[in-house]
Image (cartoon, rainbow, N blue to C red):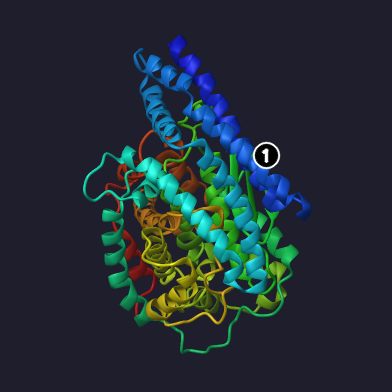
Amino acid sequence: MTTPAWQALEQRMVELRALRSTALLLLWDEATQLPARGAAARVEQNAAVQALLNERTASPALGDAIETAAATELTEDERAGLRVLRREHARAVALPSDVIREEAIAQGEGLAAWREARERADFSVFAPFLSRILRVQREKAAAWTHLLGGGPQVEPYDALLDEHEEGMRVARLLPLFEHLVGWLTPFALARSTKHLHARSCISGHFEPTQLFEFGKELLGAIGFDFDAGRVERSAQAFTAAFDPGDVRLSIRAEGNRPLAAVFSALHEGAHALYEQGLPIEHRRSMLCGVPSAGLHESQARLWETMVGRSRGFWIWALPRFAARFPQLADVSLDSFLGELNRVEPSLLRVHADEVTYNLHIAIRVELELALFRGQLAVGDLPDAWSDAYARRLGVRPTNDEEGVLQEVHWAYGGFADFQAYAIGNLYAASLYRAARRELPGLEDSFARGEFHALRDWMREKVHRRGRRDVAEAIVRDATGSGLSDDDFGAYLVNRYPIR
């Protein structure tokens, strides 16, 4: 039976979740509907809500309620929810309110400056704002570092990593990346089609409205619940989840990049499936959430690449794609898949093939860590970015827009975000291997347009777990192994043999 102490604590968690959803709703509106002249007011609105959320989370009364509930008889789920709430309370207590407010203002002004810099392809417009954002992130990290338990290897950047991937440290992350990049670089080079200038079989104009409609068709096929979600079209694809019953996503639909629209829909749709599949019975506690950014990305990358680039998927999807776009009517499945799975070093992460993708992430993590440690000045970032691309991928940006300004993450203070994409790829490969083992004939079912078996497997093994455990424990329970690049390497070898 639920104790009065837990019921009192639950009411506080309901308020925290409501405030968090309100903050996210402001960001969703800003990205989809906010008029240009509303930007200045939105900065203040975001700052006010974020400050209030941190104040409530850091409240001494909440700390007392946590300890009172901890001393009572609780269920296993309640204990798990208490652990998550205690962690969030400790992080909020450690963070000064003026840092919270300055972060919100720096993010709002930084986003506006980043957009202007992108239009001009001029990093110098954004540079002073990035310097301010970086300073605030360092202040956050310094405030949180003592929560990590100390030790000679703990550094401030670890505090930001731990926010996104609980338990992750630089001392573990860098060797993981070093090993991954070590074998991935020659692997990608051996399979590169960079010098094979074959004519694309996916050409002509693709009406953006029809691309958007096809994206919605794919969302319905993989199991997105339109009664519990909303789909918009925007230049930047993203997902915003307020509750399992209210999950919103936007997808890109550009006439000159038809496959990007497809993969955008699958990627964001998978994020949405995860959010819709969370344990709704725990929506009044912290269990109804996702334990890490890496695990969230595992779902997106799995559906976008491992499903979305498979033969089985396109046996079903290509006729439907061609029905909307007659220029594909005479394109064979083999030709289409050959185009789809080309390995070619490129400048843009969001359009990268799945072989070179993690090399893009490695570049960002390397530069970000150097910035954070003070080993790289903000003003030197464009040249460092270009040099890293030349070294890792053999390509060099011709301007800042296709170089250092291509990502919005740093503009909103998203330091330590990028590692989640690579970790997501590794988790995705392990989960996909386990799903194929337990669901014989899985790719054959894709060819029939049947995706519910995979969705339901993920719902049981991942989504329904909520935040009961840390991400690596959830993956280990589902697959038998933790975080490594073994399954990812085996997946790529199977998908991209040398011919």
* Residue 408 visible from this viewpoint: no
Where residue 28 appears, as percent x and y from the top left, is: 66, 47
Rendered position, 87 above or below 448: above
Rendered position, 259 above or below 440: below
Rendered position, 241 above or below 75: below
Taking the view exactly as shown, the residue that stands out farthest to the left is 152
Splitting the image into 4 quarters, where does residue 202 fall? bottom right
Where residue 146 appears, as percent x and y from the top left, is: 32, 39
Tell me the quarter of the image containing the C terminus.
bottom left
Identified at 63% across, 68% down, the residue is: 117
Q: Label 1 sits on what residue type?
A: Asp
Tell me the quarter of the image containing the N terminus.
top left
In the rendered structure, the answer to whether residue 121 lies left or right of residue 57 reads: right
In the rendered structure, the answer to whether residue 40 lies left or right of residue 128 reads: right
Rendered position, 202 above or below 181: below
Depth check: 208 or 102 in front?
102
Q: Tag 1, which secondary structure? A: helix
Depth check: 322 or 295 in front?
295
Splitting the image into 4 quarters, where does residue 235 fall? bottom right
Splitting the image into 4 quarters, where does residue 21 fall? top right
Depth check: 203 or 371 in front?
371
Please give the residue where the numbered disc 1 appears in the rendered image: 227
Identified at 72% across, 51% down, the residue is: 39
Q: How many marks?
A: 1
Identified at 57% across, 59% down, the residue is: 129
In the rendered structure, the answer to whether residue 46 lies left or right of residue 74 reads: right
Mark 1 closeness class: few <14, some 14–19, many ≥20 residues within 10 Å: few
* Residue 465 visible from this viewpoint: yes
Where residue 123 appears, as percent x and y from the top left, is: 57, 70
Identified at 58% across, 32% down, the residue is: 52
Where residue 116 appears, as percent x and y from the top left, is: 67, 65
